[in-house]
Image: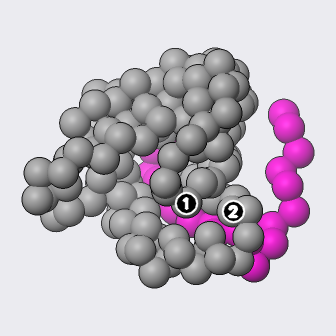
Amino acid sequence: MSKQPAFDPKLDIVFERFLDAPPQLVWEALTRPEHVSQWYMPKAWGRVSRCEMDLRPGGAFGIDITVNNGQEVPNLGCFLEVVPMERLVWTSMLFPGYRPAVFDDVPITAIMTLEAQGTGTRYVFTALHRNEGDVAANKESGWKEGTDIALDQLVEHVASMK
């Protein structure tokens, strides 16, 4: 397993949830498009219109959303690390095949870890940013709030899978 980078409160945003389900079920909810589509976008804000996940280093991580005004928002990134039931790392800084990305959004590298705790799972999502301006932009844009809502939806979705 790769070493977790040191947390920098100026550059990183961390979300944590405890899910009352084993890591295998949480992993399924995080990595299967039919499940990701159910929780990834805050329901009051829009919906996932397409989800593609090629779970291998260099593979595509694509989630397109349709916001409530009908606007389509494509999101494409690249998986960097895939350790089943333990760790998933992707970045929006690269397109599939490690091709350099070009886009207008705030880039992040996402590190998702799962840890069995009793009969449940501790889930930690860390969003690494380039600089403090990107952190501020993600907080001001509603991205942080939306991610909190989406993770609450993940907890609900996993409970419905049991």
Q: Which residue is mark 2?
A: 129
Residue 129 seen anywhere in this rendered image of the structure: yes
Judged left or right of residue 65, residue 21 is right
| Magenta stretch, residue numbers | 1-22
Look at the image and tell me in which quarter the C terminus lies.
Answer: top left
Magenta-drawn stretch contains 106: no
Judged left or right of residue 98, residue 150 is left
**Image spot of residue 71 (x, y percent):** 18, 51
Q: Earlier in the sequence, mark 2 or mark 1?
A: 1
Neighbour tally class for label 1: few under 14, some 14-19, many 20 plus, Cα within 10 Å: some
Look at the image and tell me in which quarter the N terminus lies.
Answer: top right
Q: Secondary structure at mark 1?
A: loop
Residue shown at the point (87%, 62%) measured from the top left: 6
Q: Which residue is mark 1?
A: 106
- Camera-side residue: 150 or 29? 150
Q: Is residue 151 above or below residue 58?
A: below
Say what amino acid the circle numbered 2 marks.
His
Neighbour tally class for label 2: few under 14, some 14-19, many 20 plus, Cα within 10 Å: many
Q: Secondary structure at mark 2?
A: loop
**Image spot of residue 135 (x, y percent):** 62, 73
Q: Do the residues under discs 2 and 1 have CB atoms within 8 angstroms? A: yes
**Image spot of residue 88 (x, y percent):** 64, 37
Residue shown at the point (63%, 49%) measured from the top left: 110
Say what amino acid the circle numbered 1 marks.
Val
* 2 vs 1, front mark: 1
For residue 68, what is the image quadrant?
Answer: bottom left
Judged left or right of residue 134, residue 156 is left
- Camera-side residue: 104 or 136? 104
**Image spot of residue 89 (x, y percent):** 67, 39
Residue shown at the point (22%, 36%) measured from the top left: 49
